[in-house]
Image (tube, helix red, strand yellow):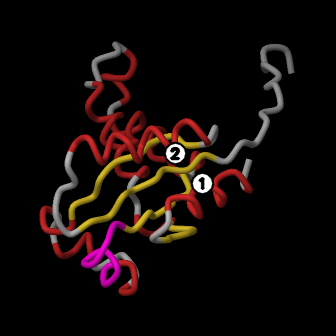
Amino acid sequence: MLFNKKKAPQQEHEWFSVLIVTETELKDSVRNDIQEEIKYNVDNMAFSGNLVLNDQPKEYTQRFKKDILEKAKIRPVYVIIRVDQDKIDAEIDALNKRHKWKKLFNLIPGYKYQRIYDEMMINPDNVVFSTENVDQAIAFLNSKE
């Protein structure tokens, strides 16, 4: 065809988000130290954060496996979630199709796109690994590079 653009082949690179699941909020210094240690040793981490079970709705926390929830009551659990870029792209396409005219004039607010990314980064359905040891979490992420 005349006007079809050829798409360059994309290199598949898996991205992961790391949630530090705890029953209560971690101190900022402790959380920052853990996040820095992971960030320093890993190249395929898209997001990291502290998920406090007491602050989350029951519907959300029930989507995690029971062993993760039980362990998180005692000590922090490092949950690694695979970021599904295809699903993110599909959600963004659906958003753009719902608001065709707003998309045409670039009037879709940025927070709607950010909400899609945030939901995919902490989606319990995509959990691939969980551990109580930060070194095991780092080893797992390094094995997936």
User: Which quadrant would residue 8 be assigned to in this image?
Assistant: top right
Q: Amino acid at mark 2?
A: Ile
Q: Residues within 10 Å of mark 2 (few under 14, many from 20)?
A: many
Give how far across and how far down residue 106 sits, in percent: 35, 15
Disc 2 + disc 1, Cβ < 8 Å: yes
The residue singled out by tag 1 in the image is: 138
Secondary structure, mark 1, is helix
- Give the number of the disc on residue 38: 2
Position of residue 142 in the picture relative to residue 62 (left or right): right
- Foreground residue among 80 and 28: 28
Residue at the image position 36 percent from the left and 58 percent from the top: 20
Q: Quadrant of residue 75?
A: bottom left
Q: Quadrant of the N terminus?
A: top right
User: Taking 26 as reference, is 21 above or below it?
Assistant: below
Between 79 and 26, the one lying in front of the other is 26
The image shows residue 33 at horizontal and vertical percentages of: 38, 42
Residue 92 locus on image (x, y percent): 45, 39
Which segment is the magenta one? Answer: 69-76
Q: Earlier in the sequence, mark 2 or mark 1?
A: 2
Amino acid on which disc 1 is placed: Ile
Q: Is residue 62 left or right of residue 35?
A: left
Residue visible at 46% across and 53% down? 18
In the rendered structure, the answer to whether residue 28 lies left or right of residue 37 reads: left
- Whether the magenta-drawn stretch holds residue 72 is answered as yes
Residue at mark 2 to residue at mark 1: CA–CA distance: 6 Å
